[in-house]
Amino acid sequence: MTMQANLSAIAGLQPAAVWRHFAELASVPRPSKREEQIRAHVRRFASERGFPMREDAVGNIVFDVPATPGHEHAPPVVLQGHVDMVCEKNAHIEHDFDRDPIRLVQDRYGPAQEPIIRAAGTTLGADNGIGLALALAAATTPDIVHPPLEILCTIDEEMGMTGAKALAPDFFRGRRMLNLDSEEDDALYIGCAGGCDTTITLDLKAAEPAGKFGVWRVTVTGLRGGHSGVDIHQNRANAIKLLVQTLSGVEDGRLRVAALHGGTKRNVIPREASALVIGAANLGAKLSAAGDQVHATAVRAGGEAGCTITVEKALASDVTLAATPKDTRRLLTLLTALPHGVLAVVPEIPGLVQTSNGATTVECHVHNGGLRFILGCLSRSSSSVQLHATARQLAAIGELAGAEVVSHNSYPGWQPNVNSPLLATCRGIYERLFGNPPKVAAIHAGLECGIIGERIGVGQMDMISLGPHIEGAHSPDERVYIASVDKSWRFLTAILAELAKG
C-alpha cells in the first residue's frame, strides 16, 4: 500500500524514471548495517535486466551496464552511491525503520514555496537514495548516450564507511568515477574531510537512594538537529549540551544523576536528550529556572524556535541506582568539557570548516553494580594533523575525568585535484548547460571518494562528486528540491554523453 502511496506522491514529476526508482528505494527499509533488503532489491534490479553483477564479502554490489551501441570502446565510468540511510524520526512518529517504508510527501518549502519531496516525520533517505535513483535511471533509460557503466552500490556509509573500506582494487574496472552523494546542484566537489570516532566510557559508583528525596525527569526536545558535518558551521543547538547546561545550572551540591541519554548517531547533531535526577524537595524548582534560562538562550542565539526543555516529577520507583553528587559533577564536567562545533577553518578559504567535533551520543547502562556512561564523538578534518590533534584532545579530557577513551574507525580525507581532466569536462558541460560556472569546492563531511581513492591507489582514480539540492539531511526535516533533481539529471546525462566519446 505504501509503494502505491509513494508512487502517487511523485506522480507527474520529471524525470519520471528517476522519481520512480526513488519511490521504490523509499519503500525498501535500508538502515545502516542492516541493508539486507535493499541489497536484495539491487540484486533483483540487475538480474531482471541481465546486467552482470558482483558482490563482495561485506555486501558491496557492482553491476555492469553495456555502453550505448557505437560507444563500446570508451573507457568505463563508475556511478557510485551508498544504499544505506540515516534513520531519524520525530518522537511522536510511530515508525520501524527495519520494517516500514518511508512515506513520501510532496510539499512546498521556503519563502519562494519551492516544490519539494519530504517524508512523513522521518528522514527521507534522499541521502543517498536520490543519487542511487539517478544511477539506476542512467542504467535503464534507453534514449541517453553513455559509455560502459559500472554501478557501484556501497554499504554502511553512514555508520562507518565500512563498505568503501573493504573494496578490493579489482572489484571494478573504471578509473573515472561520479560519486552521486553531494547535496548542492550548483557545486562540483573535489575534496572532503576525513573523520575519526572517539568513544569515552565513564564508570561511576552508584547506590540505591535512601531517605527523603525527589525525582525529576529533565527532557530537551524539538531541536533542528542535522548533519554533524554539513550543518556544523550553523551553530545549531546540541540537545546533550542544553541538558547538561540545565543540570549544571542549579548549583546544587546534592544533585545525583540516575540516568542520562542523548542523541542517536554520531553523525547527527542531537535533537533530543533526557536525564533522570534526584535531590532535595526544591530541586525541581531550581531545574525549571535553569531550564528556562537555557531555553531562552537557545531560542535567541541558536534560532531553535521549536526547542522545549521540560522538568517533570517522576516516581521514586523509576530510580534503582544513582551516582553520588561528586561523581555526578564528574560526569557533567566531562560532558561540559567535550567540544562540539567548529574548531578551525581553512586559512586559505574563509568560511570553509577545516576541523570540527561532534559530541553527539550518550548512553547510560547499569554495569557491575554502578552506572556506565558511554559518550560518542565524531571528529572531522581536512588536515590529518588536526584530526589526530582533536582525537588527542578528546582523550586528554576523558582521561582527566577518569574515563576510558578509545579512538577508532578513522578514514582519510579526499585531497582535491584541481587539474583533474574529469573536473575540466564537468565544468565545461555545466557552464554550457546552465550559463554560469559551477562552484568547485571541498565539503566538511565524509564522502567515500577519499577511501575509494586510497583503496584503488593514490592518483589512480579521477573523481567528482555531484548531486541535487538536499537540505536537512540526517534529520526528519530532510527534503529534496524537485526542480533540482531534473537539473542534476540533465547534467549527469550530458556528462555521460561527453564521456561516451572516449
Image (tube, rainbow, N blue to C red):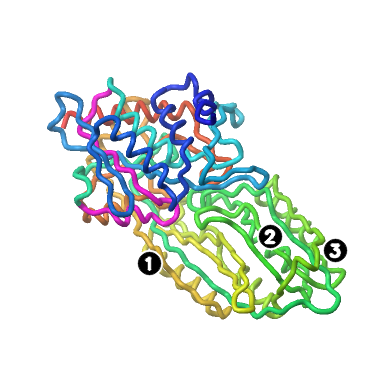
Q: Position of residue 42 (x, y in %)?
A: 35, 38
**Label 1 amino acid?**
Val
Residue visible at 44% across and 55% down? 159
**Label 2 amino acid?**
Ser
Task: Report the Cα–Cα distance between label 2 and label 1.
Answer: 35 Å
Helix, strand or loop for the magenta stretch, by majority = loop
Q: Secondary structure at mark 2?
A: strand
Residue nearest the observer in this picture, 385 or 156: 156
Q: Secondary structure at mark 3?
A: helix
Lateral position of residue 271 relative to residue 281, left or right: left
Residue visible at 16% across and 27% down? 71
Residue visible at 70% across and 70% down? 258
* Quarter of the image where one finds residue 194: bottom left
Give the crowd class for mark 1: few <14, some 14-19, many >=20 residues within 10 Å. few
Span colored in magenta? 144-169
Q: Dividing the image into 4 quarters, which one contains the N terminus?
A: top right
Task: Please name the residue that numbered disc 2 is placed on.
Answer: 274
Task: Please name the residue that numbered disc 3 is placed on.
Answer: 285
* Quarter of the image where one finds residue 285: bottom right
Inspect this view and state whether residue 142 appears.
yes
Lateral position of residue 23 relative to residue 43, left or right: right
**Label 3 amino acid?**
Ala
Q: Position of residue 251 (x, y in %)?
A: 77, 72
The answer to the question of whether label 2 and label 1 lie on touching residues, with beta carbons closer than 8 A, is no
* Residue at the outermost left position: 73
**Number of the front mark, 2 or 1:** 2
Task: Report the Cα–Cα distance between label 1 and label 3.
Answer: 47 Å
**Does residue 422 sit above or below 212 in this rendering?**
above
Task: Please name the residue that numbered disc 1 is placed on.
Answer: 385
